[in-house]
Amino acid sequence: MATLARGERLSFLDQMRALAIIPVMICHSHSSWLPGGGVGVGIFFALSGFLISKILLDAEDFGPRAAARFVFRRFMRIYPAYLVAMFSALMLALKFDQERAQTIWQAMPDLLLMVDVPSHWAGYATGVIWTLLVEFSFYATVPIAMLLFGRREGLLILCIYLLTHAVLDPFVTMRGIGNMGRFGAGGALALGGILALIPQHLPTRHTKAVLLACLLGIAVLFWLPPSTHLIWRAEILAASLLSCGLIACFLADPNVKILRGAEAIGLISYSLYLWHGLILDYRGMFYAQTTVGFVFVTMIIGAASYLLIERPGIRAGSLISKRIFTMPRRPRRASKAPI
């Protein structure tokens, strides 16, 4: 069975990230090729829900300081590149589209605080980041639930509520938790969190069959257009559930593969997601009119963002969190000499 060692980056999970980001980019660029490719966000949600929950459940020490350290490190993981992307969207809008610039400027306080997106469509650059607001809400809420009720109990309570909300909210008005109520996204994250709570996973002899079934299910979802909000919710939850099946296969057999050689794409998947919207909004300026050209340009800019912004932010978050949130060690008292 696979284990998630601290600080270890697992190639299978990067393959899953690639499986998510590539259809999202193609769907947004040329929807007729993969009309349901946007359900790749369901894959991201399942993966995030599982990893965040698993990291916190397996942490050796957990308390207010550890929770604050975790949230701060996640913040530094996503916010620097996010901040640059949002200001880039504003600057380009000021140059090319004053009406769009006004919409983004009015929404900038909410964008900077990661609480909301513009109320009116202002392009893909700000339109796609709703998923980031959902994920950061989950990053911050899980540690709080664990501190209040205990690690396993708090996670279970939160996941049950989010999943119930995602299923019932279209029919019965329910009070959500921040951005996690959007499109049933909280339920998709909750499925990953519930998987992290399960101690036993698939027996190895069933792994390949389940893996193939889950991949076929995801492929079908990529070809189903989200014709209504209700169908869109259902597709996100279905994609998340099938993705949990993929993760369970990996936990049972670490040798399984889904996209060999795609680890590099998974490594920069966050930057790809963050910047692909901006490139879509200004395809002419980036010489990305064709889908192939769009993917190529996004890969170049995404890799640069990862190397120059994202990775330094991760390192800074790790260093700063150690200094601020780590309890100082008390010096040992010198033992008295024997009489």
Image (tube, rainbow, N blue to C red):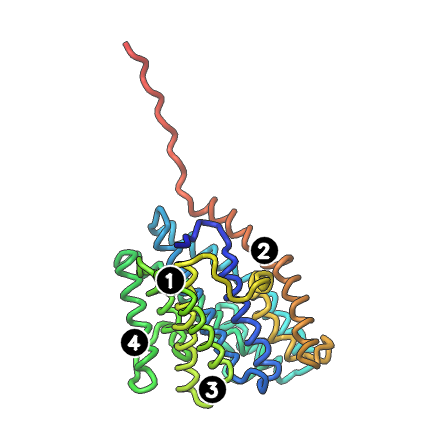
- Mark-to-mark CA distance, 3 and 4: 21 Å
Mark 3 vs mark 4: which is more N-terminal? 4
**Which residue position is annotated with label 3?**
226
Residue 311 marker: 2
Q: Residues within 10 Å of mark 4 (few under 14, many from 20)?
A: some
Residue contact at pointers 4 and 2, CB within 8 angstroms: no
In percent of width and height, residue 30 lies at 61, 83
Q: Name the amino acid type tagged 1.
A: Arg
Residue 120, numbered circle: none
Q: Is residue 299 left or right of residue 52?
A: right
Q: CA distance from mark 3 to mark 2?
A: 34 Å
Disc 1: which residue: 205
Q: Looking at the rendering, in which quadrant would you find the N terminus?
A: bottom left
Mark 3 touching mark 4, by CB under 8 A? no
Query: Is tag 4's residue or tag 2's residue first in the polypeptide sequence?
Result: 4
Q: Secondary structure at mark 2?
A: helix
Q: Earlier in the sequence, mark 4 or mark 1?
A: 4
Q: What's the distance in space between the residues labelled 1 and 3, CA to CA?
A: 35 Å
Question: Which is closer to the viewer, label 3 or label 2?
Answer: 3
Specify the amino acid type for callout 2.
Answer: Arg
Closer to us: 157 or 239:
239
- The residue under the point 41% across, 86% down is 231
Residue type, mark 4 in image = Thr
Tags 1 and 3 touching, CB below 8 Å: no
Q: Residue 314 versus residue 80: which sits nearer the camera?
A: 314
Residue found at the far top of this picture: 339
Q: Badge 4 is on which residue?
A: 164
Q: Earlier in the sequence, mark 3 or mark 2?
A: 3
Mark in front: 3 vs 4: 3
At x 39%, y 59%, the residue is: 252
